[in-house]
Every structure is written in structure tokens, then in C-alpha cells.
Amino acid sequence: MLSMLKNHTGKITRKEIWGDDYFLLSLEAPDISRESQPGQFVMVRTSTDPYPLLRRPFSIHGRNGSHIDIFFQKTGIGTSLLSQKQKGDPLEILGPLGNGFLLEDGTESKKVSLIGGGRGIAPLYFLAQELNKNQSKVRIFYGGRSSKDIPLLSKFKKENIETLCSTEDGSTGFQGLVTELFEQEMNSEPPSLICACGPDGMLKKVSQISEKNHIPAELSLESIMGCGFGACWGCVKKIKKENIKQWQKICEEGPVFWAHEIVWDE
Amino acid sequence: MLSMLKNHTGKITRKEIWGDDYFLLSLEAPDISRESQPGQFVMVRTSTDPYPLLRRPFSIHGRNGSHIDIFFQKTGIGTSLLSQKQKGDPLEILGPLGNGFLLEDGTESKKVSLIGGGRGIAPLYFLAQELNKNQSKVRIFYGGRSSKDIPLLSKFKKENIETLCSTEDGSTGFQGLVTELFEQEMNSEPPSLICACGPDGMLKKVSQISEKNHIPAELSLESIMGCGFGACWGCVKKIKKENIKQWQKICEEGPVFWAHEIVWDE
Amino acid sequence: MIDVSVDLGFLKLHNPVIAASGTFGYGLEFSQALDLNRLGGFVVKGLYFSPRQGNPPPRLAETSCGLINSIGLPGIGVKQFSHEILPKLTGLQTAVIINICGENREEYASVADYLDKHEEISAYELNISCPNVKKGGICPAQNPEDTYETVKLVKNSCSTPVITKLSPNVTDISEIALSAQEGGSDALSLVNTFLAMDIDAVTRKPKLGNIMGGLSGPAIKPIALRMVYQAVRAVKIPVIGMGGIQTGRDAVEYLIAGARAVQVGTANFISPDATLQIIDEINAFCEDNHIKKVEDLIRTLDIDS
Amino acid sequence: MIDVSVDLGFLKLHNPVIAASGTFGYGLEFSQALDLNRLGGFVVKGLYFSPRQGNPPPRLAETSCGLINSIGLPGIGVKQFSHEILPKLTGLQTAVIINICGENREEYASVADYLDKHEEISAYELNISCPNVKKGGICPAQNPEDTYETVKLVKNSCSTPVITKLSPNVTDISEIALSAQEGGSDALSLVNTFLAMDIDAVTRKPKLGNIMGGLSGPAIKPIALRMVYQAVRAVKIPVIGMGGIQTGRDAVEYLIAGARAVQVGTANFISPDATLQIIDEINAFCEDNHIKKVEDLIRTLDIDS
Ligand SMILES: Cc1cc2nc3c(=O)[nH]c(=O)nc-3n(C[C@H](O)[C@H](O)[C@H](O)COP(=O)(O)OP(=O)(O)OC[C@H]3O[C@@H](n4cnc5c(N)ncnc54)[C@H](O)[C@@H]3O)c2cc1C
Ligand SMILES: Cc1cc2nc3c(=O)[nH]c(=O)nc-3n(C[C@H](O)[C@H](O)[C@H](O)COP(=O)(O)OP(=O)(O)OC[C@H]3O[C@@H](n4cnc5c(N)ncnc54)[C@H](O)[C@@H]3O)c2cc1C
Ligand SMILES: Cc1cc2nc3c(=O)[nH]c(=O)nc-3n(C[C@H](O)[C@H](O)[C@H](O)COP(=O)(O)O)c2cc1C
Ligand SMILES: Cc1cc2nc3c(=O)[nH]c(=O)nc-3n(C[C@H](O)[C@H](O)[C@H](O)COP(=O)(O)O)c2cc1C
Ligand code: FES
Ligand code: FES
């Protein structure tokens, strides 16, 4: 998978506001769009001032011609500044970066379950689009705390993506965790591959389900990133490869790993 | 003169762009508007982030009912952020602060010459308006490097304020410094009072003219301000009062001083 | 109702927020902006025995998330202070702390002695850490013996409780903290400003008239917080933390690191009622996190997992 | 055409901008983003004799205009480095500087000895100032004797020029600068990061797995610039300045303060081609201000008026 260490300045060509806290920006970035794969990400400069200092990582949420989309949740200073940007504003973006989901390895015409928690849905939409091109059968499990955390549900419905959803407060869909919903539903139509993105607790649970049911799972991890391209060694998590456990850089070796490679507790 | 140590949040109700670098903002601030005198200033928070850290001082440029205007030049990070604000945006302002021009002391029906260099014109417009109410005869001398530095000229002309202007490059009006223009013109109609605001070099020259011609002059000084209300002791300049020379706080004792009180070199 | 009071042993504060010296005048300047009695306390600007002019301007330079000052402790001296200012500070329901300066140990002691037994005064804060006075920014708080001797002499000269204010411009803050404790200090406050400079590239001049000055503001918070954490672990006496506090959350971080109270400096310039906002935010933080007493936050850093 | 070259005596650089250690990998990682030969030089990430894992995550915390890292010098060790990386660094038209680390003096010397007489290597940078390795952040550069002995041992172990990298976590930078000079160092570079910490108020946990880390970025620039100014005045050997450089103007300020070259660290994370932008901005600055040679800027601080 090609990761490109090049800074692009792309204009914002569309802005969508999804509820109070979620935003979608379309950016003109032909080079990134051409090369990007689901699960890869971009590093976005939310300010040209020294505050906030670092770029922020965002998954590529979609691709339309020479544009890429990012979909993000406002959680702190950087995402808050980003949410104030307007159509026409230029944005500095670095990417595509990292290794995404392994589409190539025989996922064609498979049954793939995508599990997304909250903003973890961002890369899964792009993934669903690409899987659909491969004639795979895709089901999305989309969970959040309450209905306002699963804003894209209406969009998925409209685009006829099979989506099952859960909320912890029961305000929409299944009441409980998205992993509980998945466990309940998986037997009716067992997938041959799971792809998931969300908070660590959720991903850990997905790992357990994957192991127990012998279904391979690809998980997209998050970590605080200083650079996004392998230079700072700041983003490491413990990864087991060929039985050696090591701190590995999420940005370079990931962000997507096989579930069995991730060492959760130590 | 009342200086008020109170933070107000005022909406921007009007924004005018004067050329490339000059901006006027009208702010809804009834308390400030009611109390303010020409020469007083406000401290404006240009960002609620820790960068840039400090508020910026701006003279009160005008007053309309419950609104005050500020008129500023984009020169650095703070003014640049301020120039990006839009109608409707809230702005934190502290004021009115400092001691303005002494209107009370018999300036009624006098001949007053106002000398403004560049953005130094800001308080003089408000002063001219108030002097007009007093039936004083006001002449404005307005200078800048080139015609783009004297953007308000057209406005003054439209409002029938007698304005003479100069530019260093001769692109508009008299070619040379505004103090040279004033010296050339003052004899035709000698003023009984000079009020000036602009860069230190200009103000120093005005001091000399004032002394030589025995015309009292009130000068509005600039200094880097940490607080604007007397707490930091950062804004001092050397001031002579009752023959004692002391570092005095511009924000509290000024920003307007009599020319003979200011100790220029030491 | 959250109990926000904190106890320093020699002094009870109705909340942990104190306005820092040199950023709050003599307190009175702020009485238009806030009710002084709502503060945990305030520290008046540095006081020498004799009046002083301070340093030549420019005295301020703004940097990335920071402010360098080279004010240099101008002030009215102890006599004028006790005649003109102190009477106006009587009857306040808040801790009034006097920041004491000196050219040498004896001057510190004289100020402490002169103002002793004024019941308006809750404590002294010994400013042995101002980088703006001596050439090269050197101060007693950079040397353990000097710290010890200065504190001891002052303690012997007065009965008012003494808080020693430490400098961050040191290799080992624990060592200096211990010296102050051994000298008899009742508490520590830290940090004062970091010796710093800024240059105008075009004119090639220092941005400050005094060449160097002291850096304060959010930029220094991570270093100051580390030093407070270290000092707390070195001594038994209470520690008052400061450096870059702008919000209630910043204050809470210092309490968790082990400070029993905090001071707020540069933030007062940005909003004259910053201290009150911070008190409100501490209250709200406790509310949101089900904390009943602010004292329950103190020194609770979770370093086991 | 402006002459941007600078001369360190033992090393000529075609411009004063060097990428700082730990922020530029082994250089190769950046070759997609820029032509390495356009740099004055680059310093590879810290190298111990043996491979190391580094510290547990989280390893980064962003602060106001700053970044705290507790990476802890993970790396491949000197053998793998000389077999796998060094060959790829041959033939570069830029200064390649090796950042040397050690658990003790002997390890510094072994690394220096092992890599000696490789002509790809322009100089060593002795990292005696990393706050992320020992408990409490202690390092040799906080002690004059330790600095002197370490430098001397390394100098005796190799013929490669040695740049000693100093820590800002000291009371008196001039003293340490002198010790390094006396130990035989050919140049100094400063500053490394400031020992710092950050706390999550809600979880009450340190934001870094290692509790403390090193602060870098624009926040530290005013303190770092002051230290460079002081170090330059203390020693005769050339000084390389760093700390918070983001723009050409920042770099020029360091040159005016007396640095003969600069290093750029954290800025590389924000823009992988930051070093090149800074070189371009230095050129533009000289152009605008009618400066023909960058060397004409060095140590020209105007402190008389
Ligand atoms: C590979 C990757 C892809 C991501 N994709 C998306 C996405 O598509 N949509 C989306 O909404 N979010 C995504 N995130 C999370 C997003 O990067 C954070 O929410 C964002 O950085 C928070 O920045 P802030 O300034 O608003 O928050 P603050 O809390 O103010 O940030 C403070 C610091 O913490 C870091 N930080 C805080 N939370 C996270 C986090 N969860 N992960 C990494 N760094 C963090 C920030 O980068 C910053 O340095 C992704 C993260 C990673 C690592
Ligand atoms: C009493 C008073 C009234 C003023 N009124 C006006 C006005 O009406 N219109 C107008 O355009 N300008 C006015 N100024 C100047 C204005 O405050 C500065 O241009 C502004 O602070 C620059 O901020 P910046 O962030 O854009 O520049 P930067 O150069 O990025 O600012 C860096 C730092 O220097 C300080 N600073 C820079 N230049 C000045 C200056 N000339 N005076 C004071 N501080 C400065 C800033 O406050 C800041 O702390 C006034 C200044 C004073 C003291
Ligand atoms: C303008 C200014 C003046 C100061 N004067 C004093 C002083 O007189 N005595 C003192 O002990 N500290 C003085 N300080 C230091 C502050 O009390 C405080 O220790 C420091 O600013 C760090 O806190 P902050 O980051 O919240 O500002 C001064 C600080 C500033 C910014
Ligand atoms: C993530 C990170 C890793 C670093 N690793 C090293 C290192 O291996 N060796 C070293 O001498 N300095 C290291 N440093 C310090 C930098 O080289 C530099 O001294 C410091 O960051 C200050 O410069 P800056 O503000 O431009 O980043 C590291 C800094 C950072 C931010
Ligand atoms: S984010 Fe810098 S190495 Fe991964
Ligand atoms: S600006 Fe703070 S005292 Fe004048």
C-alpha cells in the first residue's frame, strides 16, 4: 500500500454538519484521492499558528473523483477549529498515510461485517464502498452512546447499505454495546471477515469474538500521533509478530492490524 | 475621566474593510459607549485560545448609540485574527480605559488641529466628532507612507471634515511627512491646540513644533500593554510631572499626555 | 455544595485560588472587577524596603503562549505601603500575602520585621526568585545555602508565617525546596518566571530593555507542574503551585500533583476576573466528577496503572 | 545570490539548518518529502550501543505551543545501524551527524569508537542531555564534572569531531558549557528538551506512560534562546542553537544571539519539509534586509541602544 509523504493544500469544497458534533469535509486532493485505500488516513493541520501545535489524524472517509472526505467528531481544540472551517478555505493535508484494510487478499465476494463505534465509522464507509465494488456482501454494525452518536445511519439507509445499529441508552436500535448486537446477529449470517474501528474497549471485545469464533478480524487502532509518518516514534502500541512482542508504530505498521497481532494487556 | 474595569462581550454589528490592511468593526457595547471619551481605548481579546496570549489595545474610533467602533491596521497575529472576524461574532472587550483628550478644559470654540499618522487617525475621528459638538473649528492633518495608508480620507471628505493630507511617496496630497505639511499650513490658520496620535517619531516632531510655537499639544502614546488597566507595569514611558521624571504607566496615566510632559530621549 | 476550602496549616483559605504577586497590584486595583473576598487570597506586588523605579522599557514581549516581563519590581517601598495601602486592606475576608524582596538577606529581614504583627497580613511570600533584578538573572533561590540562610534570617526576624517562592531556573528543585524547609519556611510557592529572552530579527535588538526577562503563561505550565510534583515529594511543608494556570482544570492538575493551593498570574492580565472564573470552574469540575471536597483532590496522582 | 554557508571550523555546512536528532529518523524516512542534500545537515536519532525498546506509551502529550515526549530512545543499536543504515547514507552532500547515547560514560565511548573513521559521518553529537532515560530525568549534562569526564572519554576514543548536546534543566548553562569545552568538545548544541509533565484531571493519571517527559516546540523558544545567548558568551567553541524554531525568522534570532548554526526538531513533525521552508525563509529574510552572507548575522545582537 502506498503511503505518500507529501504536503498538499486542498480547498474545502463541501461541508456537512451531522448533528451537534459530527462534520464531513470534502477536500480537493487529487493525488491523495488517487492513491488512497480504505483504512489509510491523512494528517490535517487545523491551524497555521503554533497553537494547536500538531496535525491531527483522520481516516479517509470517502473518495469522489479528485476529492476525499473526512468525517470527524468535535472533541477538542483541533477538531473544534476544523469544524469552524468553511467551504473555500484551504487546508494542509499530508497523505495518504499508513496501511489500510487488506482488500486484495481474497476478500472478493466474501461476507464482511464492519463494526464501527462512534467516530470509528469514518473509515468503514469508504471500506464498504470499495467492498461493494468487489461484490462482497457487507453488513455494517454501527453503535454509539445514543442516537446522536450514530448520525450517519440515515445516509447508510438511503444508500441501501445494510446497517444494524445499537445505542447504549436504547434511543435508537438495539440497546447495548455494538459488540453485543454483533454477537447476537452474527450467527444468522456468519461473516468470513470482520473489520472494525472504534474505541479500544470495543476493539478488544471484537478481538475476543474473532478468536472465539475463528473469524479473522482487521482492527484500526488509534493513538496520539506526533507526525503520522514514522518519524517521532510516539504512536506505538504493543504488537506481536512472529511471536515477538514489540512496540510498533501505529502510523507506519498500522493503523490496521490483524486482531491476533494486537497485545491488549501487559 | 471614568475608566471601567469590566469585561463586556459585544457582538460585531458592522464590518468595513478599508483597502488591504485597514478594518473598522462596530461592536455592541452600551456601557462602554455611554462612558467613553475620545482618546480612551479598549482591550480586545483577539482569540479565546492561549495564542495569541494577551489582549490588544485599540482606541475608540467612534460611538453610535449603544455601539462603539474600532478602526485598526492589520500588522501582526492579533490584528490579523481580528480582521477575520465577521458580523455577528462575539468579541470580549474591556473598557473604556485610560485618560483621553481633555475636552472639558476650555477647548470650546477653539481652533484645534488634529494630526494623525497611519492608524494614529483612529482616536482622532471620535475626537473630531466631539469637538464639532463643542463648536470648535477642527482641521485634520492625515499622513501616511502612501495613499493606501490614509484610507479614511474619502470618509472625512464626505462628512465635510476639513482634512489636509500627506504621503511620503506623494501618491496623494502633500509629498512628505504630515508634520512638514502641518508646519507649512499652521501659519495660515494657527491653532490654539494640537491633538496628535501616531508613531513616536511623528509625536516627537509634534512636541518640538508645539514647544517652538507655544501651542499646547496633547499626544496619544503607544506602548506594549500587558493588561491595559494598571496591573502589570509593562507599558511605562518616561514622563515628567512637577519636574520629576518617572516611568509612568501609559494605560493609566495616559495614553494621552501633554507634549511637554513626555521625556523623549534619555 | 462543594467544600472548596483548603488548609495550609498556618492558614486556612476559603478556596485554593490565590492571585499571584506582580500580576494583581495591591489587590485594590481589581476591586472594580471582582469582590476580593471571593478569592482564596492574593499576593501584593513585590515590596523592597525602599521605593524603586524598575527597569527601562520595553518591559514586555509576547511569545508563543507566553509572556516575558522585565518589570524589575518597581514599587513604593515598605513605609509608603504601610501608610497608604495597608490600611485599605484591613477587614478583608481573604488572605492578604505580602511579597517580600531584597537586594540582600538583610533587606528581606528588614521588610519582614517592619511589617510584622500587622493582623491584616496573613503571610509573607519571600521572593528570592525574581530573575529581573540582578545581572544575568541570578537570585538566592538558585543556591541551596543562600536559600537556607535567607529564609532563616527572615524567620528569625518575624512571627508572620513565611512562604518561600522558588525559582524554576535550577538543576534540582527538590534540593532548593529542602533548603527552604530546613531554613524554617512554613510553605513553598513555585514557580517564579523562567529566565528568557526575545530578539527582533530586523533591528537585531533584544525585545526587552533589560535584555532578559522572566517567562510566564501557558507555555511554562508543563515544566512548572513537573517542578511542583517534585517539590511536593521532597518536603513536608505545604506547596502552592503556579505557572500558566488559565482554567479550573489547570488548577485541578496542580492539586492532583500535590499542591495545596494555586496561584494565578498572567491570566489576570487577560481577564481581570480570571481568578473568579477559575474558582467557578473548579466548583464545576468537582460537581461533574462527584468530588465533595477540593482537599480530596490534593496529591492523588494515579501512578500505578 | 546570498551566501548561506556557515563554517563550524571542523565542518562547513552549505547552510545553517540541521534537522535535530529524534525528529528526523535516520534521514531516509524524509527523502520522499525533501532532497536531503539541500539541508545543512541532519542528526540521526539517538544511538546506544545495544538495541532498545523505548518507554511505554502514551509517549506524547501536546501542551500550549509545546509537545512533551517520553519516547525514551528506542533504536536498533550501533551494529545494525552500521550494517543497515550507514551504507544508505553514503554519498550524501550534506553533513550526517550521529547522536550518541549511553547508560554510562563507557557506552558513549564504545559507540564513538565503533563508528569512528566512517567517512560518511561528519560529526558526533553527544546526547548527554536526554531527560527520558534515567529515573527523575537526570542526565550527565546536569553536572559539570560528569559533562567534562564524559566528553573527555569520548574525545579520547575517537577522531571524529564531537558536538556536545546540553540540557536546559540546569541552574547555570555557562558552567556546563565551559566543562564541555574543557573536556575537549569541538562544539556545543543546545538545548535538549525541558523536563516536564502533564496530568489528565479527570482520570488523575499522568498523560505520559513514563510520568515525565521532555518539552519541545515554540513554548520553549524564549528560554532556549536565552541559554544559547549565555553559552555563546561563555565559550570559544561554536554553538549550535535550537528550541522551538518554526520559521526562518526564528532561526535568524538564534544566529543573532550567536549560534553558528541551528537545529530544527518538532517542526519536522508538523511539516516534513519544514527544514527546507526555513532555509528558504532565511534566504528571503537576508534578501529583504540586504544581508549578503548569513555569517554576517552571527552574534550581532545590538545591546548598546
Ligand atoms: C489513524 C487515526 C485515524 C483517526 N480518524 C478519525 C476520524 O476519521 N474521525 C474522527 O473523528 N477522529 C479520528 N481520529 C481521532 C482524532 O485524530 C482525534 O479525535 C483528534 O486528534 C482530537 O484532536 P482535538 O484537538 O480535537 O482533541 P484534543 O483532546 O484537544 O487533542 C489533544 C491531543 O491529543 C491527541 N488526541 C486526542 N484524542 C486522540 C485520539 N483519539 N487519537 C489520536 N490522538 C488523539 C491530539 O492529536 C492532540 O495531540 C483518528 C485517530 C487516528 C490515530
Ligand atoms: C492605547 C493604544 C491604542 C491603540 N489604538 C490603535 C488603533 O486604534 N488602531 C490600530 O490599528 N492600532 C492601535 N494600537 C496599536 C495596536 O494595539 C497594535 O497594532 C496591536 O497590538 C498589534 O497586535 P498584533 O498582534 O497584530 O501585532 P504583533 O506584532 O503580532 O504583536 C505582538 C505583541 O506586541 C504588541 N504590540 C505590537 N505593536 C504594538 C503597538 N504599536 N502598540 C502596542 N502594542 C503593540 C502586541 O500587543 C503584542 O503583545 C493602539 C495601541 C495602544 C497602546
Ligand atoms: C508582569 C509580572 C510581574 C511579576 N512580578 C512579580 C513579583 O513582584 N513578585 C513575585 O514573586 N513574582 C512576580 N511575578 C511572577 C508571578 O507571580 C508568577 O510566579 C509567574 O508569572 C508564573 O505564573 P503565571 O504563569 O500564572 O503568570 C510576576 C510576573 C509577571 C508576569
Ligand atoms: C520526539 C522527540 C524525540 C527526540 N529524540 C532525541 C534524541 O534521540 N536525541 C537527542 O539528542 N535529542 C532528541 N530530541 C530533542 C530534539 O533533538 C531537540 O533538542 C528538542 O526537541 C528541541 O528542539 P525543537 O523545539 O525544535 O523540537 C527529541 C525531541 C523530540 C520531540
Ligand atoms: S506518529 Fe510519529 S511515528 Fe507514528
Ligand atoms: S498595560 Fe499593564 S500597567 Fe499598563
Image (spheres, coloured by chain):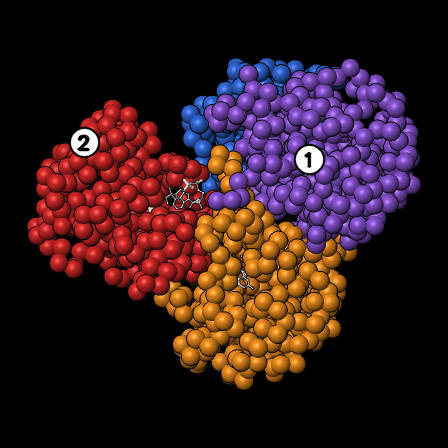
Chain colours: A red, B blue, C purple, D orange
Q: Amino acid at mark 2?
A: Ser
| Residue B11 on image: x %, y % | 47, 23
In the image: residue A40, left or right of residue D92: left
State which chain disc 2 sits on: A
Seen in the picture, residue C188 relative to D43 is either above or below; the reply is above
Q: Residues within 10 Å of mark 1 (few under 14, many from 20)?
A: many
| Residue D152 left/right relative to D47 | right
Image height of A7 relative to C165, above or below: below
Position of D97 with respect to D150 (left or right) is left
**Dot 2: what SS?**
helix
> In this rendering, does residue A212 appear at all?
yes
Q: Residues within 10 Å of mark 2 (few under 14, many from 20)?
A: few
The residue lying toward the viewer, choosing from A209 and C8, is A209
Disc 1 marks which residue?
C240
Q: Quadrant of residue C245?
A: top right
Instruction: Please name the residue that numbered disc 2 is placed on.
Output: A154
Q: Chain of mark 1?
A: C
- How far across and down, in percent of the image, does residue D83 sit? 42, 79
- Residue most extreme to the front: A212
| Residue D248 place in picture, x, y as percent | 54, 58
**Residue drawn at the location 51% of the way across and 59% of the way down:** D72
Disc 1 under 8 Å from ligand 3? The reply is: no
Residue at x-position 63% and y-position 71%: D105
Q: Nearer the viewer, residue C114 or A181?
A: A181
- Residue at coordinates 61% horizontally, 45% vertically from top-left? C226
| C-alpha separation, residue under disc 2 versus residue under disc 1 | 53 Å
Where in the figure is residue A205, as x and y percent of width and height?
28, 43
The answer to whether the residues at label 2 and label 1 have Cβ atoms under 8 Å apart is no
Callout 2 and callout 1 share a chain: no
